[in-house]
Amino acid sequence: MTPDFGSYPSASPSLSIVCYSINLFDAMGWHFRGALLLLANGLIFASTIVFTMGFFRPLAPSSARRATVDRSVPSRSAPFERVVFLMIDALRSDFVYSPQSQFKFTQELIRSGAAIPFTMKTGSPSLTRACIKAMTVGSPSMFLDVFHNADDGPGTPETTDTWLAQLKAAERGKLVFYGDDTWVQLFPEVFDRGCPISPLFVPDIHSPDLNVSTNAIKELQRDDWSALVLHFPGIDHVGHMGGADSEFMASKQRQMDAIIKEIWKALESGAHLNSTFFVVGGDHGMDRWGGHGGASDPEVSAAMMFISPQFKLLNRTYESPAVPTGGAFDYYTVIRQVDVVPTMAGLLGVPIPSASIGVFVHELLDLWSDIKDQANLVLENLDHLRALSCKSDTGMDVCQTDLDRHHLPQEPLNEKSLAELSMVTNPMSKEFQNALENATSGNIQVSVLRYGIAIALIALLLAWATCKSILSLNWDFLVLNLFQLGHSLALLFPYLVETEHHFWFWSSTIWMGWLVFTTSCHSSVVSPGRLTPVVLHLLSQRWNPHDRSSSEEVYSIQGLLDRRPLCLWLLIAVTLLHTYTFAAQRRRNVTRDAEDNPLLGLAHRAVLLVIFVFKFASAAQIRPGLIARAPEWLQGIILEQLPLTRIAQFVFLSLAIGLGYVVLRSYAREASLKNEKATEPLPLLEILNLYLIMQTIPANIPLLLIYRLQLEWLVSCAVHLSPFQVCFSIVLFTNSAFFAFGNANTIAALRYTEGFNGLQAHHWLLSPVHTFCSNYAGPIWWSGNGLRLLVATGQGKRSSSSGFFEHLGLRTVFVAYGLLGAMGACYLQREETVVLTVMAPKFLNTVLWTVPFHLLFNMGMPIVLWAVVQL
């Protein structure tokens, strides 16, 4: 049946074509539309891959061992022969330098002058892998490292030069490593012995650190090594579990401070360590929630200290604890992360790694008593940067500055001429560094981006062709295009990208209000209670704070419940009880033998109780303050004796058994239900809902109750909704739920807490799946449960395959339109400074929406439900 074109003139050529197309699709049936839809989704996947390859393609830095320079650099002495390089993951600057810090011994070292402190600014993305490369290779961070950072396999080895490789080539001793295995993945041939450990199992905040510290003490008694590299992941794990203000943060800081004290004592007392200096620093910082990966100040501000008994001879003293000198996290002198590389090379007397774009930290020049050595260090660094800038593979065709001798002070050097030298060379070095950082940070292939955009456009047109409701010039056509064009235009403004939640909150609220208004028009009774869905929607938007860049506490419902945990757990209990009450009520309505199987109801209640116990006990282990008033024997049971891994495994096994039962039961009863009223996919959806509750952090579980109440109201008025309005509602509420759950267009917003439920170690498949479902629990809930709207309109029946494929086509159109808008915004802003800090995280988020979420939950899950049960 062709739609009614109303008052549009039938003689219009464009409308005639539309009518002809619709009649053609009616004649070919849903098989043809299904083939087109499959092709469209395949092209969406292909366009995502193509655009990603062009957008995140790295440009390899110069591979030259050392650049040839006009001026020969005289040999210079080095103050040290070996190093203990201690990296404390996510050691934010204020964790060490502020008055609230528990690094008391370390602050004593700073006050005595034995430690020279800095605040080190990392690049973006502020992830461990990228930061390790910056501090060893000296190359700037590239967003491509995001795709390798969570790799638990062999990783992608780095073949570029490092100060570790230079030290190994000097043959002064073995290179030893203990800690995060990212180092071994990056440099598999560098270290001679050690014990790399996987840091990806976030819930373990103690074992990795104990392993590293135990081996470190043993290695300090040996004298056959030239570099001892230690990487402690504990503080990072504490942040991911409970945030920067976690109850475990103070004790973990004291533990790290004690390790620094042990190493310091060994340096003071061990004769074989006389020529050893000690480096303590973080790879990156963290925000209030413990996340990192973005470019906000707390994420990129890490502590960095150079420590040695010899530093006391410089007669320097520093105030410690200190107050920030600039920004909220800027203590003492601020340096770049890549500056560590030439500094390490200079202190150890090895050549500067070939790809380094760092500048020697001038505060350490006084370690050389000979002024000529100091001058040679500065000039060698400058010559290296100049030679790098002349390399064709850095993207700079000509040298930018002429280092003719008349620009520099002449011999003989003295303190005055050295100061003059620094005044000339330091700005020049920074100029080279900035140019090299821009040239080597990445190479966007414009032609590949265009191919990706073209493929996405074809996918959009193919998906559009499968949808009858938007082929004609009607209100659905106008709403779709105006909405998507508005969203695409918003992506052209970096501020709106960083605060994208406002777009989805406002649009979904307006749409909810419109639905309430139109429903009221169909009803003879108008009451204030009809505004309840809008009020609930506004409440969900205030559930989580969304200003991640602010260090100030932002008002939110979650913050209110954090101060009143009893209210939170009452809401969680109500959510679970409502799940059971709703399921029981629906079973009585849609099945004949619900009461003949009382064991099903008992099993359901048992699983709900186990889920509640698991969520409470796991939350108490992260925040023991939740049970501070409970008897000690009960605290001991909750914190120490409850086998949380086994409990989670029991829940997942129960859900799997329930899933199998529902599928088999559906097939067994299919023949008897052919002539009966179609049922909803309720049992499968309830199993999905229980899994999502398991994968949702406790503070967000009540949001699922709000969504269920909203959905019940929508279902009650779904008879007035068109297929387009049903799909548009689901699209708006899935995206709104993503941000309402506390997510954002930044890597730092990614949560790991629930990603290891039921696991005792990181699993290559289950951990990413659990983590993804945890972060996308809200959108997955709406994508699955929103299908009840389709059922209520009568479009979800098995006999109505055309309506079902209309729904799938519309979902694909929205995804393809959004992907095309994100690609266009990235393409137009490819030369702007925000391309890596703002647009790259946004496109990565779009990739997650387009590939795993869309293919699995927009398309795969509805098809499975439609095939298994009668929709």
Image (cartoon, rainbow, N blue to C red):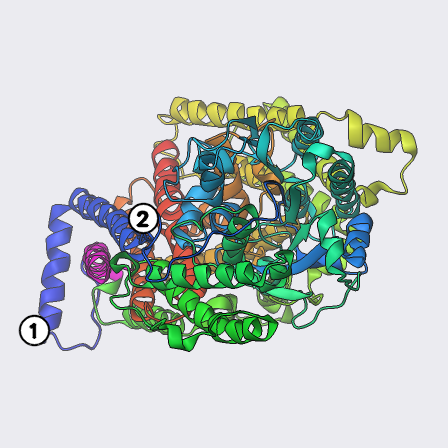
Residue 701 tag number: none
The number of callouts visible is: 2
| Residue 113 in the figure: left or right of residue 863 | right
Residue 13 tag number: 1
Residue 586 on image: x %, y %: 55, 40
Residue 179 on image: x %, y %: 59, 34
Among the 4 quarters of the image, the one containing residue 314: bottom right
Among the 4 quarters of the image, the one containing residue 652: top right
Q: Is residue 416 rendered magenta in the image?
A: no
Among the 4 quarters of the image, the one containing residue 833: bottom left
Task: Answer whether residue 659 is visible to the viewer in this image.
Answer: yes
Task: Answer whether residue 582 is visible to the viewer in this image.
Answer: no
| Residue 220 in the figure: left or right of residue 496 | right
Residue 544 on image: x %, y %: 63, 60
Region rendered in magenta: 444-469
Quadrant in which the C terminus appears: top left
- 77 vs 182, nearest the viewer: 77
The residue carrying pointer 1 sits among few (fewer than 14), some (14 to 19) or many (20 or more) residues within 10 Å by Cα, namely: few
Quadrant in which the N terminus appears: bottom left
- 624 vs 661, nearest the viewer: 624
Local secondary structure at mark 1: helix
CA gap between label 2 and label 1 equals 62 Å
The residue carrying pointer 2 sits among few (fewer than 14), some (14 to 19) or many (20 or more) residues within 10 Å by Cα, namely: some
